[in-house]
Image (cartoon, grey):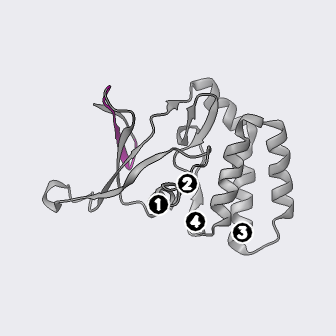
Amino acid sequence: EVGSSGVFGKVYFHPNWNYVLKTFTWDDCYLKFIRMIQHGNDPGFPKIYGTIQKVVPHFKRTLKEEEIYMVRMEELEPLDEAEVKYWHTTRIKACLSNYHDAVKKGADTTYELNALDEKKKIYRPYANVIDAMIHLTDSKKFIDCDVDLHGNNFMKRGNEYVIIDPFTM
């Protein structure tokens, strides 16, 4: 059963599965993100079960979807409308974007890291998300990507917020 779909992918679930199956078309930033988190255990990211698989054969795809991938990941809960609105009031995305841009430029990041430390104190439920994004940015694997943290790119594991798609091309 299709649970949800977005611009680049779909999520399938079944009541007998303890995971969801996510399919997505080629998106370099998302593919790098999944590859980086698949062997980790960071509470700010979804758990990945197994490895990313490239779907074949080619004749099953439409011309728009040249490459399709799938991955099994933990089932998470969506944010409610109030949580999405609250996220946008925190201005954490702006601070994370500023930090990401400073790292891209090779600039001193002291100011941005101090601002993020303040955000972690004020918005404690997002502390793991901020730490996770700092870790991703510091890896320098996402220098060619832009931060894309809006309310639809988060989900919840219990009371924890989880980033499901942090970057865009």
- Identify the residue at horizontal 57%, vertical 68% (top origin): 141
Give the image location of residue 126, x and y in percent: 71, 39
> Is 13 within the magenta?
yes
Give the image location of residue 96, x and y in percent: 71, 54
Foreground label between 2 and 1: 2
Q: Amino acid at mark 1?
A: Arg
- Identify the residue at horizontal 19%, vertical 55% (top origin): 61
Residue hosting label 4: 142
Residue hosting label 1: 35
> How far apart are labels 3 and 2 at the CA level?
23 Å
Foreground label between 3 and 1: 1
Is residue 15 placed above or below 104 in the rendered structure? above
Q: Quadrant of residue 59?
A: bottom left
Q: Amino acid at mark 3?
A: Val
Q: Which residues are magenta?
A: 6-15
Is 41 displayed left or right of 129 in the figure? left
Q: Give the dominant element type of the magenta stretch: helix, strand or loop.
A: loop
Residue hosting label 3: 103
Q: Earlier in the sequence, mark 1 or mark 4?
A: 1
Residue hosting label 2: 40
Give the image location of residue 43, x and y in percent: 62, 43
Q: Earlier in the sequence, mark 2 or mark 1?
A: 1
Q: Earlier in the sequence, mark 3 or mark 2?
A: 2
